[in-house]
Amino acid sequence: MIRIILALCLFVVMSVNLAVAEEITIAAASNLNFAFRDIATEYEKASGNQVRLTFGSSGNFYAQIQNGAPFDLFFSADLEYPQKLEEAGLTVSGSLYQYAIGRIVVWTGHESRIDVTKGIEALREPTVKKVAIANPKHAPYGRAAVAAMEYFKVYDQVKAKLVLGENISQAAQFIESGACDIGIIALSLAVTPAMKSKGVYWEIPTEAHLPLEQAVVILKSSKQQEFAKQFLAFVKGEQGQEIMKRNGFLQSN
């Protein structure tokens, strides 16, 4: 009899936990891949709620959200796409928030033997045949890469060598795999253990491109707005900001 009672109590507790636990869906710029996996893990531990992450280019997410994609939050790699969604009336009023400032770097693998201490000038070395960047048409980090090359007056000599990734993570994969000799990627990807063990990078000065101000919005179509607010508060908080800093992001304020 006691065993039956204990079993019933356990069933009730599990049922309550399942009823309380909620899931939020997040569209996140691909440069957030590693940082947000850590943040999601810690948030789930603290809240008991689940986080479903989808990574990709900010421009593609912007188009998907305009067409009704069922996300609760959109963490963009820039400020412009969230602002446009806000102007279109697709976001929760007052939810627009600049959560981080990104950085870009020149990265190459150890096997390439390209001297990245030369900075962006390394892109012009005769041994460089292919240069990877994210597609500037829909990836903010790709636009920053082009701006940096123009700032240092190497773009005209390099543009024929450019290989465009669908997003910044794919651009990083092109170099890491050896498909490209060198490239411009997010610092947040360059500092990951896998990339650090396989190559070296040079940080591009912030004055070489417009600031990579990264912003988030909660979508008006979300059915989990309260839980979305909780997750955003976690990102803004001390633990979330420490994870962002550890992954190569500057604090927004």
Image (cartoon, grey):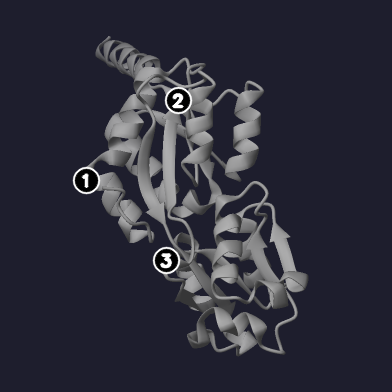
- Number of other residues with Cα within 10 Å of mark 2, as a class: few under 14, some 14 to 19, many 20 or more: some
Query: Is 215 positioned to the left or the right of 250 in the image?
Result: right
- Relative to 203, does residue 221 appear above or below in the rendering? above
Quarter location, residue 141:
bottom right
- Relative to 178, does residue 69 appear above or below in the rendering? above
Q: Which residue is mark 1?
A: 238
Extreme-left residue of the structure: 238
Query: Is 208 positioned to the left or the right of 140 in the image?
Result: left
What is the distance, in whole Å, between disc 3 and disc 2 at their CAs? 40 Å
What is the distance, in whole Å, between disc 2 and disc 1 at their CAs? 23 Å
Q: Nearer the viewer, residue 197 or 66?
A: 66
Residue at horizontal 75 percent and vertical 80 percent from the top:
129
Q: Which residue is mark 2?
A: 23
Q: Nearer the viewer, residue 147 or 97?
A: 147
Residue at horizontal 43 percent and vertical 45 percent from the top:
214
Percent x, y of residue 35: 41, 52
Q: In the image, what residue type sits under mark 3? A: Glu
Residue at horizontal 60 percent and vertical 90 percent from the top:
113
Percent x, y of residue 239: 25, 46
Q: Decide which of tag 3 and tag 2 comes sooner along the chain.
A: 2
SS type, badge 2:
strand
- Number of other residues with Cα within 10 Å of mark 1, as a class: few under 14, some 14 to 19, many 20 or more: few
Q: Which residue is mark 3?
A: 207
Q: Nearer the viewer, residue 128 or 89?
A: 89
Which circle, 3 or 2, is nearer the viewer? 3
Percent x, y of residue 158: 70, 75
